[in-house]
Image: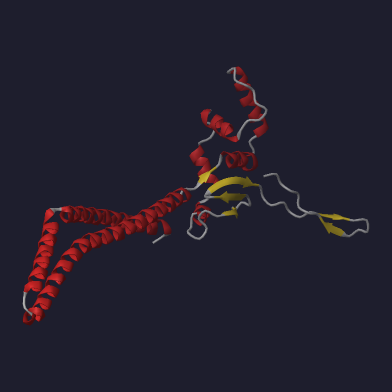
């Protein structure tokens, strides 16, 4: 499984998790609102009030009873007090528990949304990087350096065409306009040119998981070099210049530095 397949799998699992959490949150939210409604109803309050009145009645009764009934009065009073406290606790704990569970689901849902956004971001990035493209600049360099097309002459033709069409005459002709012009007159097919520029073995290397999205230079079998950045061929370099030797004053040959080639 490559990185793209892994991300797709993780994203699918994350989406399922989000959907389940949404359903759980909705159910728990209904329980929460139902619990709030029940706690605000008259049943709890009436029950509490009844037990409170019962407690007060017992207290008054106990005060009037004889000494031999004091122990029994104490036990009955404690029992009534326990029921009264339990009724109040049950009311508050019911709402608090559901609210806590709802908050926990909400936190998980927030985390799942964040993970989903990150996975989507990486998926779009990998989708873009997994498709190799060739820039117009690289195509023009290929036509100039490998095919031998006179680019300067071609630019003059385009300038002349601009003038005929009454368009503004620019000092420079951009590379994408040169490519479009050649395609328009049927001299090249961009798709075929791109396949020729990037051999299949180099394409597989560039799109491998280890080098995907990196910047580097790749040498073709014929000596020409391709400069790649973010899965795009940005430059088509000429063959490396050979080291030339010349004699110095004493008859010894010295090595010259290779000439710098314009990118």
Residue 53 in the figure: left or right of residue 200? left
Rendered-image quadrant of the C terminus: top right
Residue 18 rendering spot, x and y as whole percentages = 30, 55
Residue 107 higher or lower than 232, as above or below:
below
Residue 187 rendering spot, x and y as whole percentages = 54, 32
Residue 170 in the figure: left or right of residue 114? right
Residue 196 rendering spot, x and y as whole percentages = 53, 45
**Quarter where residue 112 is shown:** bottom left
Residue 94 higher or lower than 37, as above or below:
below
Q: Residue at x 28, y 61 (%)?
A: 100
Q: How is the image coloured?
A: secondary structure
Q: Residue at x 59, y 20 (%)?
A: 167
Number of marks: 0
Rendered-image quadrant of the N terminus: bottom left
Residue 168 in the figure: left or right of residue 252? left
Q: Residue at x 58, y 18 (%)?
A: 165
Camera-nearest residue between 162 and 219: 162
């Amino acid at each position: 499984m490559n990185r793209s397949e892994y991300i797709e799998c993780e994203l699918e699992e994350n989406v399922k998790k989000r959907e389940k959490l949404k359903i759980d949150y909705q159910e728990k939210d209904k329980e929460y609102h139902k619990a709030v409604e029940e706690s605000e109803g008259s049943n709890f309050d009436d029950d509490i009030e009844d037990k409170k009145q019962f407690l007060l009645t017992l207290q008054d009764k106990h005060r009037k009873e004889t000494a031999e009934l004091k122990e029994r009065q104490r036990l009955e009073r404690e029992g009534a007090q326990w029921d009264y406290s339990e009724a109040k606790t049950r009311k508050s704990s019911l709402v608090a528990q559901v609210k806590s569970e709802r908050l926990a689901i909400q936190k998980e849902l927030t985390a799942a949304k964040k993970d989903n956004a990150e996975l989507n971001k990486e998926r779009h990035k990998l989708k873009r990087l997994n498709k190799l493209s060739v820039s117009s600049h690289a195509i023009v360099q290929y036509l100039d350096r490998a095919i031998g097309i006179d680019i300067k002459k071609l630019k003059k033709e385009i300038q002349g065409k601009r003038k005929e069409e009454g368009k503004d005459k620019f000092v420079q002709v951009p590379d994408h306009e040169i490519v479009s012009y050649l395609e328009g007159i049927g001299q090249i097919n961009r798709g075929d040119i791109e396949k020729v520029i990037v051999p299949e073995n180099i394409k597989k290397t560039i799109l491998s998981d280890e080098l995907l999205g990196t910047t580097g230079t790749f040498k073709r079998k014929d000596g020409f070099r391709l400069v790649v950045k973010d899965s795009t061929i940005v430059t088509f370099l000429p063959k490396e210049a050979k080291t030339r030797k010349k004699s110095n004053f004493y008859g010894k040959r010295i090595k010259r530095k290779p000439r710098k080639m314009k990118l």
